Amino acid sequence: MIQDYGFFISLFSLYYRIMYKLLSNLFIGSLILLTACSEENKRTDKGETTDKINQDSTLPKFSRDLEAIKEDGVLHAITIYNSTSYFLYRGEPMGFEYELLSRLANDLDLELKITIAEDIDELFHMLNRGAGDLVAYGLTITEPRQKQVNFTEHHYVTHQTLVQRMPDNWRSLPGYKIEKNVVSNTLELMEDTVWVREKTSYAERIKNLQNEIGADIPIEHIEGRIPTDEIIRMVVDGEIERTIADYNIAAINKTYYPILHIDTRISFAQRIAWAVRKNSPQLLKAINKWISKEKKSDDYYVIYNKYFKNRKSFRARIRSDFYSKNSNAISKFDDIIKKNAERIGWDWRLLCSQVYQESRFNPKAKSWAGAGGLIQLMPATAKEVGVSNSYDPAQNISGGVTYLNRMRDNFASVEDSIQKIKFTLAAFNCGLGHVLDAKRLTKKNGKDPNVWDNNVEEYILKLKDKKYFLDDVVKYGFVRGEEPYNYVRDIFLRYDHYKKFIER
């Protein structure tokens, strides 16, 4: 019994030592974990990146869905300035995304405001922090991206392709020799560097391709501010050897740069779409409904072909001095317009927008009413301001600015300079008397007669109705108010585009 007792004492002692050690280790482990968490919190407080922070940064920090957008009356879109999405050509804003956005905003009865992303890598960051309501740009739908945003119905399907230069003497070489001098198989990329922006679907594809072929592919990253069409031009100029692009973008660029080789396929078919915040389900539903409707119309495909398949149009744009990515020019009359804009104290880009509105920069333009020239002077007005030939650009613009100055002198009570310009433009369009009538109606109805926006513009619209044009304060009667209303709005909307593309 004593021996058995000793045995149990020894066994208990062993059990105690083991449990003590286990508990001690558990305590130390917990202490280390708590310390690590504390340190992690400290690092997070200092702004250092952690996996959790990375995940949180992909979530919306701003909330604004369709109801709030409609209440505001403005659809804010984020896009990229490049040769297919959004650009300026011969004084007119253009682009696949721009044209579709304009149609979407019109369908939703909203004004469109566009923000250009300076860094393509920041598109989702901008969206989730409220810089816009949607990203309208050709985005490849990928699984990692779907954790950050909700994609719309796709606009089109394409695939990624390798963009590289053919050999210098390619025109004299048979096809098989050209293939020997380019990367024609993805396995060959193990020894050849690819240049891409870091946070793109192209970079994602290279990473996946590395796993597929079981080897590293040398990658060089390009700044996020450089769009794909400019990276393609870097390949053409020999600054880099190769890059990756969506095939439709590569193909339209090849029409202008035939030295490009774009036949080495990098991916399977991929859907290209726009994106909204994850907390904007109403907006997503509305956009998807609109896309479904648009895809049933011929116009949708006409717009796509215009920017991705019309080779002649693309070549003409790229060669033009009045393509905003080539120069700081709007029209061939810029020097005349700049000189006269100084006389009136306006931004020359604003005066350019008015000239485009009047004649689309056609110095021989003539209206049904007899107005002629770049700024469309009526014969009596031309004579009044000393213009002997309305079809002479210098005379026409000079006379037009003289007349604008005279109109402006009638609005001395308007203190805000932008509002004064809007009154001046409206008077130029429909006549001073009708604008003064609208001012009197505005005052009579308790609104501000010295503010055009949401005040006098509302009453110039009403002057088509008998109730208003027969009012005792109205001296000049009926006018189609939509004309001056849209005239002022269109000039300023275009001016906003000009400011994005053209330096003052």
Image (cartoon, rainbow, N blue to C red):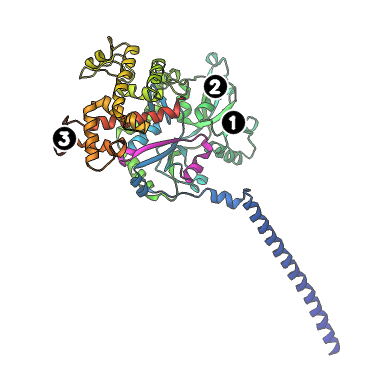
Q: Residue 208: which quarter of the image?
A: top right
**Location of residue 498 with respect to 200 vertically, above or below:** above
Dot 2 or dot 3: first in sequence order is 2
Q: Which residue is mark 2?
A: 236
Rendering coords of residue 59 (x, y %): 50, 50
Q: Residue 316: which quarter of the image?
A: top left
Q: Which residues are magenta?
A: 104-130
Neighbour tally class for label 3: few under 14, some 14-19, many 20 plus, Cα within 10 Å: many
Dot 1 or dot 3: first in sequence order is 1
Furthest toward the top, the residue is 388
Mark nearer the viewer, 1 or 3: 3
Q: In the picture provided, is 43 more to the left or to the right than 357?
A: right
Q: Secondary structure at mark 1?
A: strand
Q: Is residue 238 visible?
A: yes
Q: Are marks 2 and 1 in contact (CB under 8 Å)?
A: no
Q: Closer to the camera, 193 or 504?
A: 504
Identified by mark 1, the residue type is Trp
Q: In the picture provided, is 485 more to the left or to the right than 478?
A: right
Dot 2 or dot 1: first in sequence order is 1
Q: Which residue is mark 1?
A: 195
Rendering coords of residue 79 (x, y %): 45, 35
Distance Cα–Cα, label 2 vs label 1: 13 Å
Q: Which mark is residue 469?
A: 3
Q: Which mark is residue 402?
A: none
